[in-house]
Amino acid sequence: MPWRTRALWRLRSLAVALPPYVWLLAFFLAPFLIVLRISFSEAVIAQPPYAPAFDLADGIPGLWAKVQEFTTYNYAFLAEDSLYWRAYLSSVRIAAVSTAVTLVIGFPMAYAMSRAPRRWRPLLLALVILPFWTSFLIRVYAWIGILKRDGLLNHFLLSTGVIGEPLTIMNTDLAVYIGIVYAYLPFMILPLYASLERQDPALLEAASDLGSPPWLAFWQVTVRLAVPGIMAGCLLVFIPAVGEFVIPNLLGGSDTLMIGQTLWDEFFYNRDWPLASAVAVLLVLVLVVPITIFQRAQARTTG
């Protein structure tokens, strides 16, 4: 192959491979490094509300002197204060339960969509993504009118005789679960549908011909082949649910403790940017665990 052709081929490969890395550098790594740097600072009453602040005019010796002023106080404070650990654990618990419920609801829906006549599938997909056409905040606000004591749900249950007095759902963890499951259900259905729709129904027939009961064939063929879609859907629901702020703030009560609310309070009420940055850094580290598990599972599946 002539050297010019090889050079053009390498240049073309670089042009294809480079944009994702530039995207990650600009929108993930650079902001994360800024937050990480602030987490080693001290809170002060100034602009910005932390010290030390870098000034390029100080030159490298000046910058190095300020780096030496970094402190791990914020991380030590987080380790000692049980409030933050309870917030992390509560967020992981609520996100994990919500993800499990979303999977239980989303899998049958995705399976039904994947087995529906082809002419109906675009309409069913449109119905799944239809809620995204309205504001997320408006949809969460709508649940207040449904879940409050004199809301639509209690009116319906009272009128049908299912309950004798109104239920208290608003301002509880149950309302937060309902809100998260509703808001993130499409994120579970779409990757599941993509995984199930690619499966060949002849595999189930082959398992049945070999003597496998229908439920066992469904488990060993349909569910196992859908594992990549299940993992992707669980990640798409679990990761944003851990840091969710809007839903617990609007639907949860004073006993609902999630790390997203804690971050908001530290940034905007207490103006303690260094402590809030330390909370955010630890949150990212918590989320790295499921992402790593997913990548290893995906590597085993494709390998």
Image (cartoon, helix red, strand yellow):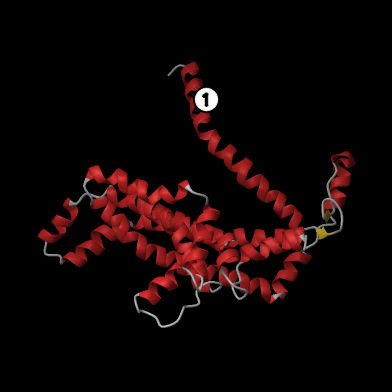
Instruction: Please say whether residue 303 is visible from this viewpoint.
Output: no
Left or right, residue 56 beside residue 282: right
Q: Position of residue 36 (x, y in %)?
A: 71, 54
Q: Position of residue 187 (x, y in %)?
A: 43, 54
Left or right, residue 266 beside residue 207: right
Q: Residue furthest bottom?
A: 164
Instruction: Please say whether residue 230 is visible from this viewpoint.
Output: yes
> In this picture, is 91 found above or below 60?
below
Instruction: Name the one closer to the observer, 215 or 137.
Output: 137
Badge 1 is on which residue? 11
Q: Residue at x 70, y 53 (%)?
A: 35
Q: Residue at x 72, y 75 (%)?
A: 80
Q: Position of residue 251 (x, y in %)?
A: 55, 67
Badge 1 marks a residue whose secondary structure is: helix
Q: Residue at x 10, y 59 (%)?
A: 209
Quadrant location of the N terminus in the rendered image: top left
